[in-house]
Image (cartoon, rainbow, N blue to C red):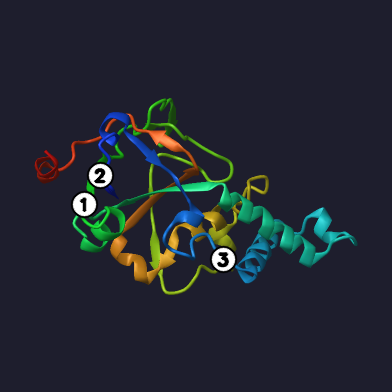
Amino acid sequence: MHLYKYMPFRESFFSELMLRATPLHALNDPFEGLFNREQIKEMKVSISNVHGLTNYEESDEYNEEYDLNETIVHLQQEFNDLGVLSFTEDYTNPLMWTHYAKEHSGIVIELDFNQALFTNSNKTHAGRVCKFAHNTLFGYTEFPQKVRYRRKTPRFNRDDIFVSQNKYEYQYKKFQEAILLTKANDWIYEKEHRKRQSKLIYRLKKMLPVFEYLRQFLS
């Protein structure tokens, strides 16, 4: 799979080959990573439908409102610690050239996700060499996931979709994934694929040549 990334022109990029994973709060959609109390309540009901109540939830000390608030704080902190690398299927969109390539003065790079993308890629996921094979919370990998564009925010009342059958697995993994990979229909023109990982700068192992017309333009 080949995807593309718009960026301002920076001559040092071609010698350093680095990409920055952007924190959610720094992305241009103000609703990135936002969720509400009703979504958390639905998720908790779905989890209890599959695995039953925990001992704490069945005890006299259980405070539903306190537990809900603690879950919200915990999830928000995880989102705050997350970085996003965004790519697109479309390298000719004039709006994205304006928004992400410094008003048509930047470049687009092409990335081949059939190969290991980053240096120090020494793990394996789905038969491919990668840097981030697995992570308990977010399942970081080198392979971007396609963003879904919807008119409404996700609902979590389908325990068959959002709840792991393994009761010892982190149960909010698919909740986080749905929040991060769902955007409003207004953004559909971006045809985005995104990678979720920590807020770091990653050194690329290799990069396909910039399109010929861009090389001619920059020379």
Q: Residue shown at 23%/47% (left/top)?
A: 108
Q: Residue shown at 42%/25% (left/top)?
A: 120
Q: Secondary structure at mark 3?
A: loop
Q: Nearer the viewer, residue 139 or 195?
A: 195
Real-space CA distance between mark 1 and mark 2, rounded to the nearest whole angstrom: 7 Å
Q: Which mark is residue 158?
A: 3
Check the image and name the residue furthest to the right: 60
* Residue labelled with disc 1: 105
Name the quadrant of the C terminus. Answer: top left
Q: Is residue 195 left or right of residue 79?
A: left
Instruction: Please tell me which of labels 1 and 2 falls first in the chain.
Output: 2
Which class describes the residues within 10 Å of circle 2: few (<14), some (14-19), or many (20+)?
some
Discs 1, 2 touching: Cβ within 8 Å? yes
Q: Residue shown at 28%/29% (left/top)?
A: 15
* Residue labelled with disc 2: 9
Q: Nearer the viewer, residue 91 or 128?
A: 91
* Image location (x, y in percent) of residue 98: 26, 60
